Amino acid sequence: MKITIDPGHSVNMNAGCIKGYFEGNTTFALAGYLKTALEQYEGFSVVLTISKLQENPSLEERGKTAISSGSDVFISLHTNAASTSARGVVAFHSLKRSGSKILSEQLAQVVAQTMGTYSRGSLTRLYPGTTKTDYYGVIRAAVRGSGVPYAFILEHGFHTNPIECAWLNHEANLRKLAEAEAATFAAYFGAVKKELAVKSDTTQDMTLKLGSKYTVKLTAKQKPNFTVGNGKVLRTKSEQQLGDNYYLSVTATGKVGEAAGVYANGKKLFTVKIS
């Protein structure tokens, strides 16, 4: 799973109502924290549209980075602007990627919860005079062709709102946002943190004769939580550990015809049916 993160704008662009706040500086810092947080999860890799704060590629170039890198997700980070009373979090997903709506709504909700504000949900915006063209150029560029399934902008509150701008102006709060957003991505795509990731030498469902045993090898950085769906059908046992390899067994103890799932750290590995 490859994710392109676009820190909106550039150095000292779009000043907020709190002295020292700039949207471009904030989104660049947040993008770095989010990249770090996402890459703590197994299977996630991250591409940034800019590597230095002073860089300011065009919207076209930013969006096309997702395509050229073979990314599955394009997310452009921003903070909003309006009146001093305007507040809340909103996402804008592509008209051509309706599947982006659920993920972007979940991200908007978790950002709102973290900031202590409310979510406006995930919306689409139509380019004037058209019926199927996205308003935002960065999204238009990201969804050319069919290679990037998820594309959206995420507005992290309003930098014209004194309360939200002050909250965003703290590095610790940006780190909180990054962790919360990364956890949302992980939950949506079923990813686990690398220290909890488990590789099994067996993923195929099987049958076991009543009373017989099967030993599975699990490879993990720490001992996995090895469980079964029904302890009356299968009994588990830890056999031995050799480095990062854990050998654990299941014994068929139930009745003929019964079945139960086998799990590691809550993720199903395979099903065993008693014969």
Image (cartoon, rainbow, N blue to C red):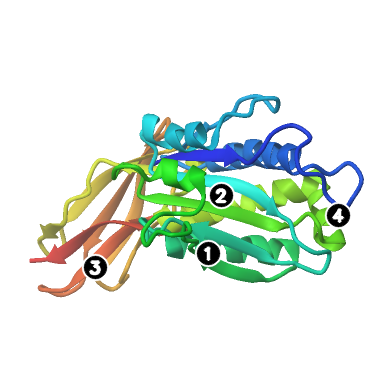
1 or 3: mark nearer the eye: 1
Tell me the residue that label 1 is attached to. Answer: 106
- The answer to whether the residues at label 4 and label 3 have Cβ atoms under 8 Å apart is no
Q: How many other residues sit within 10 Å of disc 4, few (<14), some (14-19) or many (≥20)? A: some
Q: Which mark is residue 166?
A: 4
Q: What element carries label 4?
A: helix
The answer to whether 251 is drawn above or below residue 65 in the figure is below
Q: Earlier in the sequence, mark 2 or mark 1?
A: 1
Q: Nearer the viewer, residue 222 or 198?
A: 198
Q: Which mark is residue 15?
A: none
Tell me the residue that label 2 is attached to. Answer: 182
Residue 258 in sight here: yes
Q: Which residue lies furthest to the left in this view?
A: 275
Q: Position of residue 135 (x, y in %)?
A: 49, 54
Real-space Cα separation, disc 4 to disc 3, in angstroms: 52 Å
1 or 4: mark nearer the eye: 4
Q: Nearer the viewer, residue 37 or 97?
A: 97
Tell me the residue that label 3 is attached to. Answer: 260
Q: Earlier in the sequence, mark 2 or mark 4?
A: 4
Tell me which amino acid carries mark 3.
Ala
Q: Position of residue 192 (x, y in %)?
A: 46, 49
Can you say which quadrant of the picture contains the C terminus?
A: bottom left
The answer to whether 120 is drawn above or below residue 170 in the figure is below
